[in-house]
């Protein structure tokens, strides 16, 4: 099948996220980079796009131009990635969905829960792909965990423990740095800082692996660095919609933690433990047996894990491959749709607008709980 | 100085805790095992004590006999260890304290907070040593953490994360096993199971290292294995009396976790991480520098750490040495008292009746919070 | 600058190495896949190349066709990757070098030392790039080690310990499997099996980091699985040309080891330790201080490490990024040459024909030593 | 059974090894410390022994006095530990054996191979226990490895890899320190420094686990710190008497390594990996399955491992317990002999004079090989 046409909005010069998207979309020879509106400054946007090798007529000066031109092209984009500032995600995602494009939106999908619900409804109406970039779910051993849960290896899942903690906002001397400060300012960041920024990745991962969504939360938000209004350290208790108990900790003041995204899952028949920083090993303890180390690439792993894996066992694979797996899954869906097929979303495994909405609901509920003496608060998913 | 006279109540044949106390009290040549009432069956008690080498007249049939006889001996015991079933700790501790003995009581010190307050008051009145066996605080690198906090290496401590989780009560098929079941039965175990049994060790460790006591808690208790009334998985948010934020997780259904007692401490100027299962390494990240691995026995550690360490660097030391350090610290206190000296309790570092009382208050408050929708609940320490 | 034209010989359908080269060459947007002779079967070669998106006239049926056609094109290839069976590397590399192409050859560069010397001489004469794919040297923290050595952080290097061991040829029941058997058959594999296949990667890594080449070796080769003529387990002592002592172990029967490529370097002033399976951490012990964990992406690392790194700290990066760094370094060289500049090979850091020749000499010397009672044997590098 | 009478020669005030022996002999309530000649200065010896609680008539001024007095006592010592300087081990061990005492000698048992052979012959003649303190073999998971090998879990053992490396003699500025210098001076230390001091522990461990003794060696000794005559870094290839291949590395200049004693064993049917620094975990990979982590204390381990273990699973146990297990095994033998029983040495598992002799032969052979261009050299065990 010919390569799929791909474009990006945002991710301009110097942006790490833009580089990551170009790198990861290219990794599997599925997508060809064809169009972009890569900077809020139209001149820079055109110049940078051209410099990256886009045809001049597809190096757009704005996302509006891009939408207008692409929607009438024969070789229109098969997928548009939205990597602009958070506050613009809703508007752009909505516009492209409405015009029949498939979209991959950076997280957070929207700034409010109401907007998220609107996107979910719109996606349902249009039927286009609306993916959200919870990229860690692309790790082969995360997909392995999910398959083991689906397969019943753990029996009924009783609980999970999820973390996403780092220490890179711990320096009080750096707290007024604008690149840090806005995150803890409710006027710019909304109702939550660290839980919304990092914790939500851990929660998505747990939901993805368990196949359960959060139903209610009890949260404790702490602003440990003086002067902050929003939390830099969050502890959240959860109940999932099929009964699992959840424990989640996220912090940005945990000096010594780097990118501490971990997930433990405990069921009737066994327990699993995985850490993003060493993502090629999965610790699996079938009850009353020894702990086993499952290695990415070893014999006997699930098809989903094998499909997400590129190199033979023992080669360290990492985040770029994981993120590329989101693209790979989306490509599989697009290609199937071109052939008139409809694949099972569960088998495809990429995160969707619904996941984006659940995240917004979880953030809202946690923030409410935190201001109400940690009282249990239900997610509003209606 | 001559060896100190030591005796034990409980810890009869087949008891691991009894063996541990004999082993750890002997480790430093400070205590001589001289007396015991080691079984609730008087015949067995005398027989077993004699078999272990006690003089026949000091292998007692009951703790009452032991108290009556020892209190009039010239060579009376310098320290009595109480390793009987939990429900008897209060009565025996009280009786020995009232008669002028120094006591080391297994945890929990009492079954209720009121009893604990009574012991604290009694200890204050008699001035005898009343230690409680939070033995993990004897690890050299735990003492190192504490000294680093006291020394200001971390600046003000902002938060801690403590865990004590295992998976040994996860098997539903084993839930009716009497050795497991009583733990989750409020009639036998009180208001809390896993938090009171294991979590409280993690909380003591945090208090010990931070030099701060818990002030209020918000707790979520979950009984994951069907049929249990008390929690087998607990998540507790805390505020300490000098402002530190606390996160604590304890579980007995975490299949794959063995004896997962860990403590992380985060301050303005750095973070620490320690795990009981690999206790000879302490991870220390001074802010804006690399993570360092501090090894037990390396040059430049604190005096408290060095004093608690027996072998040169690189030799794995473990729990028996840690527990022996509690005895070592108590011996230092007893020897000083014999010389008419009064040592600073902070420097001695062994856990006291006050710690036992704080634990009971924390358990009470957590259990109340858990039944009140996780609402924040103050500890009653008055 | 416009994208560089890239082509590949070999790496046909189902080949992992072919996929890896396409993936890694694409990762940085530097190379465009333009031509290939991807299968020994001309029909399959054309069909597969076209299917991957090559223009039909550049999906060649043989490397000879490719050479003939490409050498007269205006948009001739900037780099040709050779990923064919080992026995053909020499002939193809030679042919393309002679016709003025830059080449990246899979290892081993040749089957014999004499051939390797011929390639080195040819490269010197033509001045074209002749790189050899010792891809592990592209890891950011390997480049960090190298810079620390160059910078004198370790003082004079005294010794290194290198390993590359796995257990995937341990099963005697699988020994007759043709995919395994040929490796241990001197008629097909030459004078060495495991040392030549894996150990040589570890040796290249050590040479790369130390900036020293091996001068003499004493080797013990063992064929542990019955029926094998060549070694499946090798121990090699070395002396490097600037005096460093080397210890190298490589095995294919080490059940439980996955892809155990590790390097430790010890100097007057400190020691380093790195493992491919967890490649984002580098353990650095400045003498008389604590061990530090250097994290890929942290502040203060060398420019070479930063340049080889794609994502922020804490994101696991892995082998695909490392291998892509070889392409990135070659691209930098090609682009400079197009501008008439000559960059310092040491700064570029990609492995060259000279490295390929040293490897062949080391293999020859080790095999000779192993058959002469492990007597010390000099490398023939003249 | 009454406690066994134990005494020590050497291990005076300030000696770590003396403290370790008193601590470890006491750990199991089997031995009572009854006699000692603890210092070469008779006055200090008597004073220190008395201070430690010995009866004045058994706090001897010299080992000769001790021998003369103890051999005529009714309650003569059941075991004498020899912890004097290396050069005196032979003489004292010989004297006590000749007079019918059981002996536990620190390693090295003698200074020469001839002396070692004399001790072995003497032990055979007298039938007394002559143990040598290769204490690391007392670790529960080392004994587990040994039982798994004996039980055939690995099939025929093909190879082992053993290490014992540290970096504490790496500082050139410290090389003239007398406490370091003598170790590298052949006049004081004999034919080998690092291999004889540390490497030999690793070799004993391998022999113990495999149930095979070394038959021939090829060694490379390097003196990396300027001015040293004896090696501070050794690489040794081995062949064991039942065919296993061995690889051993030992270094004292490996900055960053603490007490790096590790053993890997590879057989037809699986592989094992253990490290002294984290001794409670044993990595076991049955061929074609996942790696398992065996935890000290878990269900299903061997009796030998259980017997060597004191605390429940998950509690870190360490070197003091391991060393105590040597005493525990000797006590079992002594108690059996008192009852007229003869236990199987293989089941007892403590290291004997024969092990001490093999060590001396291995050191001799390795030193010869190292000076003969690493040529293979047979051990002289006749």
Image (spheres, coloured by chain):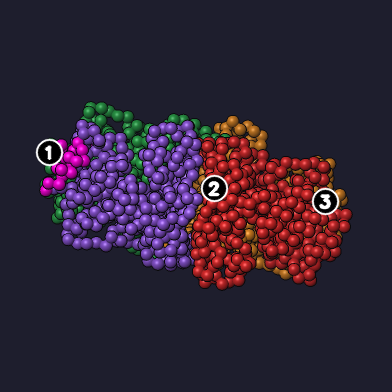
Chain colours: A green, B orange, C purple, D red
In which chain is the residue bearing label 2?
A: D
Residue linked to disc 3: B54
Instruction: Name the quadrant of the C terminus of chain B.
Output: bottom right
The residue positioned 86% from the left and 54% from the top of the image is: D75
Are the residues under badges 1 and 2 in a single subunit? no
In which chain is the residue bearing label 3?
A: B
The residue positioned 27% from the left and 37% from the top of the image is: C12
Residue linked to disc 2: D246
Residue D27 located left or right of residue A106: right
Q: Say if residue A112 shows up in the picture.
A: no
Residue C287 located left or right of residue C325: right
How far apart marks 3 and 1 lie (CA) works out to: 97 Å
Asked whether C365 or C250 is in front, the reply is C365
Asked whether D3 or A190 is in front, the reply is D3
Residue linked to disc 1: A72
Instruction: Name the quadrant of the N terminus of chain B.
Output: bottom right
The residue positioned 59% from the left and 48% from the top of the image is: D215
Q: Which quadrant of the figure has residue C66?
A: top left
How far apart marks 2 and 3 lie (CA) works out to: 50 Å
Contact between labelled residues 2 and 1, with CB atoms less than 8 Å apart: no
Magenta residues?
C51-74
Spot occupied by residue D382 in the image (x, y as percentages of width and height): 67, 49
Are the residues under badges 3 and 1 in a single subunit? no
Q: Circle 1 — which element? A: loop
Does the magenta portion include C64? yes
Spot occupied by residue D222 in the image (x, y as percentages of width and height): 51, 61
């Amino acid at each position: 099948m010919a390569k799929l046409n791909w474009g990006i909005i945002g991710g301009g010069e110097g942006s790490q996220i833009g580089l990551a998207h170009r790198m990861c979309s290219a990794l599997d020879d599925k997508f060809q980079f064809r169009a972009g509106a890569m900077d809020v400054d139209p001149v820079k946007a055109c110049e940078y796009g051209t410099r990256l090798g886009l045809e001049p007529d597809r190096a757009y000066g704005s996302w509006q131009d891009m939408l207008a031109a692409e929607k009438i092209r024969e070789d229109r984009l098969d997928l548009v990635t939205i990597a602009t500032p958070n506050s613009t995600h809703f508007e752009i995602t909505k516009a492209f969905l409405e015009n029949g494009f498939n979209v991959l939106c950076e997280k957070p999908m929207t700034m409010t829960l109401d907007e998220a619900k609107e996107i979910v409804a719109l996606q349902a109406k249009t039927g286009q792909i609306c993916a959200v970039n919870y990229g860690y779910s692309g790790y082969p051993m995360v997909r392995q965990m999910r398959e083991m849960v689906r397969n019943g290896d753990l029996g009924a899942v009783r609980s999970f423990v999820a973390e996403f903690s780092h220490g890179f906002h711990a320096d009080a001397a750096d707290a007024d740095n604008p690149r840090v400060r806005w995150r803890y300012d409710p006027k710019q960041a909304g109702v939550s800082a660290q839980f919304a920024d990092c914790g939500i990745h851990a929660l998505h991962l747990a939901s993805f692996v368990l196949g359960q969504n959060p139903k209610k939360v009890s949260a404790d938000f702490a602003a440990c660095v003086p002067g902050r209004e929003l939390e830099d350290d969050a502890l959240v208790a959860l109940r999932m919609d099929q009964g699992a108990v959840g424990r989640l900790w996220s912090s940005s003041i945990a000096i010594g933690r780097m990118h501490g995204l971990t997930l433990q899952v405990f069921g009737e028949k066994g327990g699993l433990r995985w850490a993003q920083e060493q993502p090629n090993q999965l610790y699996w303890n079938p009850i009353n047996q020894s702990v086993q180390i499952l290695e990415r690439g070893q014999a006997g792993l699930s098809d989903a894990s094998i499909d997400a894996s590129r190199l033979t066992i023992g080669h360290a694979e990492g985040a770029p491959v994981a993120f590329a797996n989101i693209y790979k899954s989306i490509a599989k869906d697009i290609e199937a749709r071109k052939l008139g097929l409809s694949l099972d979303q569960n088998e495809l495994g990429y995160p969707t607008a619904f996941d984006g909405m659940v995240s917004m609901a979880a953030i809202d509920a946690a923030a409410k709980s935190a201001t109400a003496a940690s009282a249990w608060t239900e997610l509003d998913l209606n």
